[in-house]
Amino acid sequence: MSTTGRGLHGHVLETLGPAITAGEYPPGSVLRTDELAQQFDVSRSVMREAVRVLESMYLVESRRRVGVTVRPKSEWNVYDPQVIRWRLAGADRPHQLRSLTVLRSAIEPAAAALAAKHASAEQCAELTECALGMVSNSRGHQLEGYLFHDIAFHRVILNASGNEMFARLGDVVAEVLAGRTHHEVMFEDPDPAAVTLHVQVAEAVRARDAARAEHLVREITVGALQELDILAP
């Protein structure tokens, strides 16, 4: 849930959200909307709108005559892309990256196997196009270009699985891939072996080879975990 372009309450969220996820306001802390409105120099209606967004993420709960209370981390919507982004920007980054990468390793191989069975011709073509885009951006420190195609590649895998639960994880995977790049938890150029694996996955899906597609994506996620051991221990 991006707050870009949301004006005043977006500005409040981009300050208050990371502060909550970083633990600056521990669980049980009570925030007064009047005081926050004054602190951020915004109207109470703007502050209430920001609080409603935080409530939708289960970061806080609002009670009459009590105020806005920070909820325990165990209750947060940890799948919300904005919550992921905030956590990746803070001290929780190593744990968050590892947790999300383990999630990927559990889900994406199964999704790839299903994609090999269910992907349409258009999805197979799109997957190949994404893999080739990764190849063309894999040298010369073109990490943003590589990231664009990498995110698109994994979205296709999840969507082509035909499983709506897997498909809804597209934004989650996008955030962890973006986090690895934007917080420099990657080498200056992607691992050539990982790039090749993506090309091979596209070939396996097109060939309807579910076992090979699953195996190759598992190799990709294992490699991502190994990168974390090196770059974000």
Image (cartoon, rainbow, N blue to C red):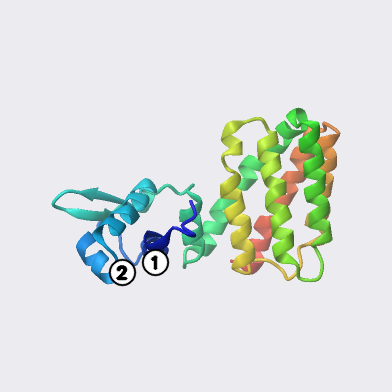
The answer to whether residue 211 shows anywhere in this view is no
Residue 90 locus on image (x, y percent) = 47, 67
Residue nearest the viewer, comparing 6 with 198: 6
Horizontal relation, residue 146 to residue 82: left or right: right
Residue 34 locus on image (x, y percent) = 20, 63
Q: Which residue is drawn at 80% across and 37% down?
A: 124
Up the image or down, 148 lies above or below 155; here it is below
Q: How many other residues sit within 10 Å of disc 2, few (<14), some (14-19) or many (≥20)?
A: some
Query: CA–CA distance between discs 1 and 2?
Result: 9 Å
Question: Which element type, helix, strand or loop, lies under badge 2?
Answer: helix
Quadrant where the C terminus is found in the figure? bottom right
Q: Name the residue furthest left.
A: 65
Horizontal relation, residue 56 to residue 30: left or right: right
- What's the amino acid at mark 2? Phe
Contact between labelled residues 2 and 1, with CB atoms less than 8 Å apart? yes
Q: Name the residue under label 1.
A: 15
The answer to whether residue 11 shows anywhere in this view is yes
Name which quarter of the figure residue 189 lies in.
bottom right
- What's the amino acid at mark 1? Thr
Up the image or down, 100 lies above or below 205; here it is below
Residue nearest the viewer, comparing 21 with 4: 4
Residue 40 image label: 2
Residue nearest the viewer, comparing 229 with 56: 56
Residue 28 locus on image (x, y percent) = 25, 56
Name which quarter of the figure residue 186 lies in.
bottom right
Which marked residue is nearer to the observer: mark 1 or mark 2?
Answer: 2
Q: How many other residues sit within 10 Å of disc 1, few (<14), some (14-19) or many (≥20)?
A: few
Residue 67 locus on image (x, y percent) = 20, 55
